[in-house]
Structures are given as structure tokens and as C-alpha cells.
């Protein structure tokens, strides 16, 4: 467990739960948290024990986005300093989104600005019915560029454009409708439900799940043509021929659990 950072990480049974713990500032993030959280996620990505990552928070809010004091400092930066700062935030979102392991956001409270980006960058998001969401950057005369690719991917261009332009709030039910959130539940059931998803994922081949993420990213960016057909056929052929693919098929035929499932 990491006790020195503004979050804690607990690993149990192949599931890593990273919990933001700055409720007094609504789990807003600054450059220090961005750096620490990026490194933590990179480490979890390399950890062979960890199979699933849950991103959670304490307090009333999941994350309010950028910390006020951080924004004050950014306002005094020149363009070069702002560029490096923005690259760090973009790097956090990229790391979370591109983790080879499934990621689950346990959204127990509201998410604004960059907090919406954290939700969008995860593969699955469970939210409390009371949770509110907003991309409020335009109200400050800026834009959600660093989180934009993940928000647009999750919500679609039309809805992302609306909420990025208006900065209006929307509730968890609406977040499900537009694809930002996977499922809504009672507030005290958010983390238990996220863990239920994690337990489901532990039954699946680790490499297969990583390849699913690769497949989705590839298909979204390409036309439905013969080249895509050839790529996807080659993809499944490689995975079938892998050690994991062979073990999965053998386990099915022999009516036993594959070797990646905990006995």
C-alpha cells in the first residue's frame, strides 16, 4: 500500500484498487498528483500479479478536475511551461486509457472537467445515481483538450461537442445514455459493483482482454473494408495460436478451468 501519495493502492486477489483520498478538495488534482498517479498506473501495468485496476475516490466527489491552486500557478506560466504541464496531464490520461489491463472507474460522486476524463479513459464506469458530470473548461475560457480524445471516444462526437460547448451539468442517467458511464447503481453499491465486474474479468484470459482493447481501438480508427477484414482475421489467428489461446481451448474441451483462473 502506498501511504505517502494523495491516493492509496491496495492489491488483493489480482485486483488493484487505487483510491484518491483528498476529499477536502473534492479529489481535485495538481501536477504532483498527475505525476504520482501516472507512475503508479505504469507500475501496475508492469505488475504481473495485477490483472484488473479499479480507480475509486473518497468523499462527496469522484474528482473535481484541476485543483484551484494549480490553476492559479498555470495562469502565471508562459506557453512553454503550460505545454509541459498539459503534456503531463495528457500523459496520465493516455497511460490510464492504454493500460493493457481492464480498468474500472468507481464513480461514487460527481466528476467535473478532468474528472470526466478519468471516467472516460477507463474501460468500464459504475456511477452513483446522485453523481453529476460536467465539462466546465469553457466557463474558464479554456478547453478540455487533454481529456478530449477519451471523452469523444466514450460519448461520441455529437454529445461531446454539446457538453464541451455548454459546460452544463448532466446526471448519471444521462451519462449512461450517452456512453460515458456503463452502469448506474446506489451510492453505497458503487465500489462493490466495480469489484463484481473485476471478479468477472478475472475469469478471462489476461492476454485476450488486452487484445480486446487493441481490437476496439484499431476498428474504431479504420474503415470497414478488406484491409480491416484481413487485419481482424490475422488478429484472431495470432491469439488462437498463442499459449493462452491454446490453453483456453484445451480447458474448454477438457471441461476444466484454464490455468489463469484462480482455483
Image (cartoon, rainbow, N blue to C red):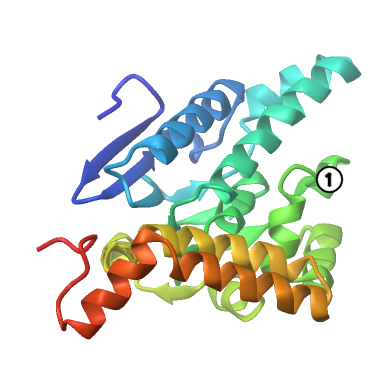
- Residue 88 image-quadrant placement: top right
Give residue 37's position: percent from left, percent from top: 49, 31
Give residue 14's position: percent from left, percent from top: 25, 50
* Residue situated in front as seen by the camera: 88 or 139: 88
Q: Residue furthest left?
A: 263
Q: Residue at x 56, y 24 (%)?
A: 35
- Residue 9 image-quadrant placement: top left
Quadrant where the C terminus sits is bottom left
- Vertical arrangement, residue 68 with respect to residue 126, above or below: above
- Kind of element beneath mark 1: loop
* Residue situated in front as seen by the camera: 184 or 170: 184
Q: Which residue is drawn at 57% across and 76% down?
A: 176
Give residue 69's position: percent from left, percent from top: 64, 22
Q: Residue furthest front?
A: 241
The residue that label 1 is drawn on is 143
- Vertical arrangement, residue 106 with respect to residue 69, above or below: below
Residue 35 visible to the viewer: yes
Give left or right: position of 204 versus 111.
left
Quadrant where the N terminus sits is top left
Judge the density around disc 1: few (<14), some (14-19), many (≥20) Cα neighbours within 10 Å.
some
Give residue 104's position: percent from left, percent from top: 43, 58
* Residue situated in front as seen by the camera: 115 or 250: 250
Residue 181 visible to the viewer: no
Give left or right: position of 161 versus 130.
right
Q: Which residue is drawn at 88% across and 41% down?
A: 141
Amino acid at each position: 500500500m502506498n501511504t505517502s501519495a494523495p491516493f492509496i493502492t491496495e492489491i488483493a486477489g489480482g485486483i488493484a484498487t487505487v483510491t484518491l483520498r483528498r476529499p477536502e478538495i473534492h479529489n481535485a488534482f495538481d501536477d504532483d498528483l498527475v505525476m504520482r498517479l501516472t507512475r503508479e498506473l505504469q507500475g501496475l501495468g508492469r505488475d504481473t500479479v495485477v490483472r484488473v485496476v479499479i480507480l475509486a475516490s473518497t468523499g462527496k466527489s469522484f474528482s473535481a478536475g484541476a485543483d484551484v491552486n494549480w490553476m492559479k500557478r498555470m495562469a502565471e506560466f508562459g506557453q512553454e511551461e503550460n505545454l509541459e504541464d498539459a503534456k503531463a496531464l495528457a500523459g496520465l490520461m493516455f497511460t490510464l486509457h492504454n493500460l493493457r489491463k481492464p480498468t474500472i472507474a468507481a464513480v461514487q460522486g460527481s466528476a467535473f472537467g478532468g474528472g470526466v476524463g478519468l471516467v472516460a479513459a477507463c474501460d468500464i464506469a459504475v456511477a452513483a445515481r446522485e453523481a453529476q458530470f460536467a465539462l466546465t473548461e469553457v466557463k474558464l475560457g479554456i478547453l478540455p483538450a487533454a481529456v478530449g480524445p477519451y471523452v469523444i471516444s466514450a460519448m461520441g462526437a455529437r454529445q461531446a461537442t454539446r457538453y464541451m460547448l455548454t459546460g452544463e451539468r448532466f446526471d448519471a442517467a444521462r451519462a449512461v445514455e450517452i456512453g460515458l458511464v456503463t452502469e448506474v447503481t446506489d451510492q453505497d453499491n458503487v465500489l462493490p459493483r466495480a469489484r463484481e465486474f473485476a471478479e468477472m474479468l478475472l475469469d478471462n484470459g489476461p492476454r485476450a482482454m488486452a487484445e480486446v482493447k487493441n481490437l476496439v481501438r484499431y476498428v474504431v480508427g479504420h474503415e470497414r473494408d478488406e484491409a480491416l477484414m484481413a487485419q481482424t482475421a490475422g488478429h484472431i489467428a495470432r491469439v488462437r495460436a498463442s499459449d493462452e489461446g491454446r490453453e483456453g481451448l484445451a480447458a474448454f474441451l477438457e471441461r476444466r478451468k484454464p490455468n489463469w483462473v484462480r482455483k
